[in-house]
Image (cartoon, rainbow, N blue to C red):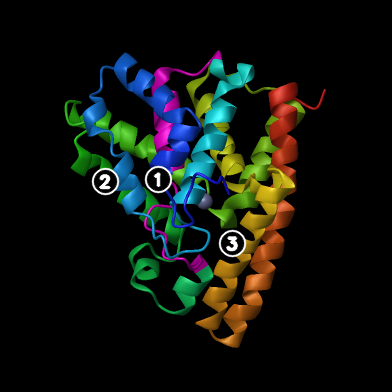
Amino acid sequence: LHPGVSSTGNLLTLTLLCDIKWYLEKLLFYLNLDICYFPAVMVQEDYHSQNPYHNAVHAADVTQAMHCYLQEPKLSQSLTPWDVLLSLIAAATHDLDHPGVNQPFLIKTNHYLATLYKNTSVLENHHWRSAVGLLRESGLFAHMSLENRQLMESQIGDLILATDISQQNEYLSMFRSHLDRGDLCLEDANHRHFILQMALKCADICNPCRTWELSKQWSEKVTEEFFHQGNHSCLQINSDLYLVLIEIYSAVWDFLLYWVVFLANGSWN
Ligand SMILES: [Zn+2]
């Protein structure tokens, strides 16, 4: 990881290093939002620094990748400032308050979150609700009407919920169909929203595409977290972890391939 970032995760340092903080400040100024209310420190503190992988450094890594995607000419010409701000907030909060274990573990151990969210996108629902709570507490959008605030919260939710790994195949086949037809039109708000979901999904899983020095460390971190979970699970859950790892890494390459095709041409043609 970057030498300026501690292993416990310093989101502010990393965003500063990557120029995102400057970009965010410009964006907030443009949207007439008060930078004083931007909850960067709160976001950092709501990640668990003891998690080897799902901590504030991962959030910063995903936010930096999202920032790069948003700068791609194919996207930057069509996105509104709100699209950009909500995408960066969703990226920074997409794993907020992650407990360091996955959904099958939460379901099999009858965790209260699994019950609360009826075994469906358990972690992603929790990250989204945590993000909404944090944003409300920060007061960043307090001046907006209730209707607009609810719309903003639900758009952030759609982005975060799209990172659910168990929904990969549905998103992958929708993306593939659009690329086959070459019908993605970024002037259409629904298509733009779908592409931002794809962007966040790719940002979330793109660390194998970093330099070898970085991607090797990310693999070690995610493996460490999985094995740490395995130490607290029964044998069946432990064996499931290998399947999850295989599933994640096979989906990574398909998504990234489709994403590159989209950024380059918008279709397979
Ligand atoms: Zn993530």
Label 2 secondary element: helix
> 171 and 221: which one is in front?
221
The circle drawn on residue 133 is none
Q: Determine contact: label 2, label 1, CB under 8 Å.
A: yes
Q: Position of residue 224 (x, y in %)?
A: 59, 69
The answer to which image quadrant residue 184 occupies is: top right
Q: Disc 3 to disc 1, how far (Cα)?
A: 19 Å
Q: How many marks?
A: 3
Q: Which mark is residue 134?
A: 2
Q: Earlier in the sequence, mark 2 or mark 3?
A: 2
- The Cα–Cα distance between marks 2 and 3, rounded to whole angstroms, is 27 Å
**Where residue 100 sits: x, y (%)?**
46, 66
Q: Is residue 163 left or right of residue 174?
A: left
Question: Badge 1 is on which residue?
Answer: 93
Residue 181 vs residue 138: left or right? right
- Label 3 Cα neighbours within 10 Å, binned few <14 / some 14-19 / many ≥20: some
In magenta, the rendered stretch is 77-103
Report which residue position mark 3 lands on.
Answer: 221
Q: Secondary structure at mark 1?
A: helix
The residue lying at 38 percent from left, 74 percent from top is: 111
